[in-house]
Image (spheres, grey):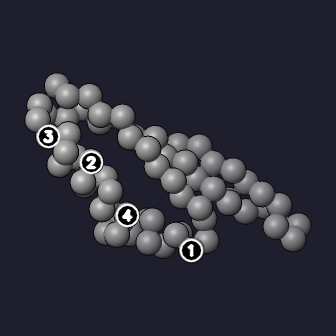
Amino acid sequence: MEGDIEDVDGVLKIAKIRLKYFFKIPPDTKEKAERALALYADMCPAYQTVKNCIEVTWDAEMEEL
C-alpha cells in the first residue's frame, strides 16, 4: 500500500491510497478471484467509509498454486 498526502488549505490530508494485492489461488479459480476483486469494494466497510473522501485504487497479481 502506498499513498499521497496533500496540503489542503494548510491541513495535511490523505488524498490517495493505492493498494497492490498478491494472491496465491487454487488452480482454475482465476476467473472467480477476478470477479471477487471487481465486486469487493461494494461490501468493504473501509472502502465505503472513505470512498468519497480519498481516491482509492487497487491492482492485483494472482499466482495459481
Mark 3 vs 4, N-terminal side: 3
Name the residue type under label 1: Asn
Q: Residue at x 31, y 52 (%)?
A: 37
Q: CA distance from mark 1 to mark 4?
A: 13 Å
Q: Position of residue 39 (x, y in %)?
A: 30, 62
Mark 1 vs 4, N-terminal side: 4
Mark 1 vs 3, N-terminal side: 3
Tell me the residue that label 3 is attached to.
Answer: 29
CB atoms of marks 3 and 4 within 8 Å? no
Q: Residue at x 29, y 34 (%)?
A: 62
Tell me the residue that label 1 is attached to.
Answer: 52
Q: Position of residue 4 (x, y in %)?
A: 69, 50
In this image, 10 relative to 56: left or right? right
Q: Residue at x 63, y 56 (%)?
A: 16
Name the residue type under label 4: Ala
Q: Position of residue 41 (x, y in %)?
A: 37, 63
Q: Residues within 10 Å of mark 4 (few under 14, many from 20)?
A: few
Tell me the residue that label 4 is attached to.
Answer: 41
Q: Secondary structure at mark 4?
A: helix
Tell me the residue that label 2 is attached to.
Answer: 34
Q: Position of residue 35 (x, y in %)?
A: 24, 54
Q: Nearer the viewer, mark 3 or mark 4?
A: 3
Q: CA distance from mark 4 to mark 2?
A: 13 Å
Q: CA distance from mark 1 to mark 3?
A: 32 Å
Q: Quadrant of residue 61?
A: top left
Q: CA distance from mark 2 to mark 1?
A: 24 Å
